[in-house]
Image (cartoon, rainbow, N blue to C red):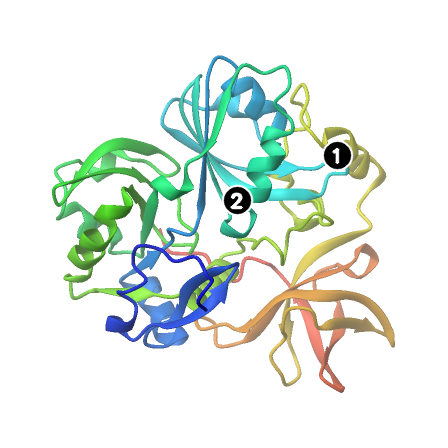
Amino acid sequence: MENLKKTPLCNEYEKYGGKVIDFAGWELPVEFEGIMAEHNTVRNAAGLFDVSHMGEISVKGKDAMKLCQHLLTNDLSKLKDNQVLYTFMCNESGGVVDDLLAYRFGEEDILLVVNASNTDKDYQWIKSHMEGYDAEVLNISEEVSQLALQGPKAQEILQSLTDTDLNEIKFFYARKDVIISGKNCMISRTGYTGEDGFEIYTKPEDLSYLWETILKNYEVRPIGLGARDTLRFESNLPLYGNELSDEITPLEAGFGFFVKLDKEEFIGKEALKEQKEKGLKRKIVGFEMLGRGIPRHGYKVVKDGKEIGHVTTGYLSPTLGKNIGFALVEIEHSSLDEEFEIQIRNKTSKAKIISRKFYVRNK
């Protein structure tokens, strides 16, 4: 792991029992005390994630908004200042270059928070589509570090460290210049776990101090990538490379709400409009195993001896105690309660399509 990128917390993981892996070229903890325990900590109290590997791309200038409208499927013109939007950046055929969060701080000041594995690709994609736009695009990822505090007790815990009234930061809003335990931060309230929570953006040199300060609260535990994946999966949130890719469109993934086809134009609009008008040929479904075995990413989905798709994500759900998954399947086999089989090694095991809303938190 000598050549892997590291976050400012790389020396902190071992102190908490972190087991590190190579994730998209980064050395990151997959777990600390175990995925199941960490998952339940976030569902019931609060967990702290190091998400400094995420990419941050700044778009500023007179045409910042116009450029982002051209690049992104969602409609940023509907945002107020300090509001955040989930959106896709698509290629001309409607496949997903990346899914990301767009932060609007003004007509000429937009921050795009992108997936770590796609940061360089996204930056080059944006730069290659800037002709005719008066805007400055900078990859500022190395200047920004990020923690995520997630769980039903996240607000109570973070509130004890700041004078800013966190009730004023609504869901999918952000605020700059929030002082947390003496450090200047930007705070947002989005989350990738299905629970309430906050993202804390800060300078890399302040990250270790904030990490240790927050973890002094006995109800907070460090959380690794393993639980991050089970949490997002239970809450019907996609992972790039699983439910989304250059070949899988937002419509096939079931996230058409974030594609505004009534917008004047954006890259991929015509392809997505045509796909919607002609009808999907495949889609992502949720399923529950009826037979034995845990479904894993890439396992084949079979119906009457014919391959009809593949598993995109699968786990033993810590919250539900069931083996469940997402699968990309042919549209004629995508109805609720339809049964098919998952090929697990050399055998097949029965599964049934169920709602993808595996878990909905009690608000």
Residue 262 position within the rendered picture, expressed as x and y whole percent measured from the top left: 67, 23
Residue 131 position within the rendered picture, expressed as x and y whole percent measured from the top left: 64, 19
The residue singled out by tag 2 in the image is 119
Q: Closer to the camera, 100 or 13?
A: 13
Viewed as shown, does residue 262 lie left or right of 276?
A: left
* Residue 72 shows up from this direction: no
Q: Residue at x 29, y 75 (%)?
A: 17
- Quadrant the N terminus occupies: bottom left
Q: Amino acid at mark 1?
A: Glu
Does 31 sit above or below residue 143?
below
Residue 55 position within the rendered picture, expressed as x and y whole percent measured from the top left: 46, 44
Rendered image quadrant of residue 79? top left
* Residue 354 shows up from this direction: yes
Mark seen at residue 222: none
Callout 2: few (<14), some (14-19), or many (20+) C-alpha neighbours within 10 Å? many
- The local secondary structure at tag 2 comes to helix
How far apart, in angstroms, are the residues tagged by discs 2 and 1? Answer: 19 Å
Q: Closer to the camera, 139 or 286?
A: 139
The residue singled out by tag 1 in the image is 92
Q: Amino acid at mark 2?
A: Thr
Q: Closer to the camera, 88 or 333?
A: 88
Does 34 sit above or below residue 79?
below
- The local secondary structure at tag 1 comes to loop
Viewed as shown, does residue 327 lie left or right of 133?
A: right
